[in-house]
Amino acid sequence: MEVCLREAERIDDLQFGLKIIQNHKKFCFGTDAVLLSHFASIKRNDLVADLGTGTGIIPILLSAREEQSRLVGLELQADMVEMANRSIGLNNLHSRLEIIEGDIKKAPEMLGPNSFNLVVSNPPYKKGGSGLVNPDDSLAIARHEIMCTLEDVIGAAAGLLVAGGRFAMVHRADRLADIICELRRTRLEPKRIKMVYPRIDRPPNLVLVEAIKYAKPYLKWQPPLIVYKEEGQYTEELLEIYNMTGQ
């Protein structure tokens, strides 16, 4: 399908016949989105929501993992929604995937409460008022809790999920205590945790968490993921994840 590109936009090949439009002046997806799309336990006929979908990268990658799923992405920024929907057209996914403009805090009333089997999110990592804020609004919103907080994201996921539904999220490792406390407060029980280390001799910088709505307590720690070898090359495990997700 022929697609019109705007200024500063490019088309990136995701392999498996998938492509995505990105604007190098705005927020582009990174390794964290790829890791989450691999970590999330998507199943046949799942109805899936991605909160703060940005370019639509996570639902696009998930669509290749399970062809019988239906997916919707929710994004606040109108220009990102428009660009993500052009990526959907580029991949002929309109029958299965839709990107909607809207506020995460209103997700249950917009998308339907207690109706999703899987909710995923790669939310802003930094608390509002912490660190340097990018003067570009789109980048600031993607990285800082300006328009939504961790509590907003988890609360929206809890409202969207059916009983027994799954919530998968990637976040900064140093927010793990906040994440677990908020998950349990909203009756989302943490079930799987995987720590991500940039190198084997450094502390973790990311964490992948899966929780299940109304589940009983029982937490599984998965083997840690190391991103880089000492030589600065990707580890075999990370390369395998990229190959499995189409990167």
Image (cartoon, rainbow, N blue to C red):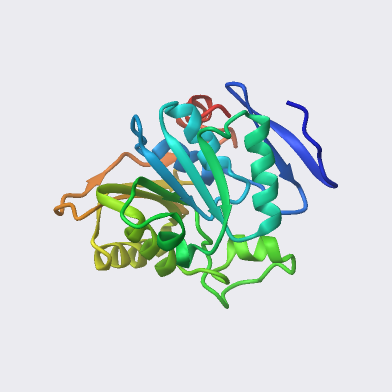
Toward the bottom, the furthest residue is 129
Q: Quadrant location of residue 2?
A: top right
Task: Quadrant for residue 31, please give it.
Answer: top right
Which residue is depicted at the point 36% across and 55% down? 160
Instruction: Classify the position of the N terminus by image quarter.
Output: top right
Q: Considering depth in this image, is 115 or 10 the residue closer to the camera?
A: 115
Q: Is residue 5 left or right of residue 15?
A: right
Q: Residue at x 49, y 62 (%)?
A: 104
Farthest right residue? Answer: 7
Q: Is residue 187 above or below residue 127?
A: above
Image x and y of residue 121, in percent: 46, 52
- Image check: 117 left or right of 8? left
Q: Residue at x 57, y 52 (%)?
A: 100
> Where does the C terminus fall, quadrant-wise?
top right
Spot occupied by residue 86 in the image (x, y as percentages of width and height)? 69, 40
Task: Report the front residue among 197 and 65.
Answer: 65
* Residue at the limit of the structure toward the left, as seen here: 216
Q: Is residue 27 visible?
A: no
Q: Is residue 15 above or below residue 164?
A: above
In the image, taking residue 221 as reference, residue 55 lies left or right, namely: right
Residue sitting at 77 percent across and 38 percent down?
Answer: 10
Q: Position of residue 169 (x, y in %)?
A: 41, 51
Of residue 189 and residue 204, the one placed in the foreground of this image is 189
Locate residue 21, reporting x and y percent: 71, 39
Instruction: Count up the numbered dots.
Output: 0
User: Can residue 46 be seen in this snapshot?
Assistant: yes
Residue lying at the far top of the rendered structure = 16
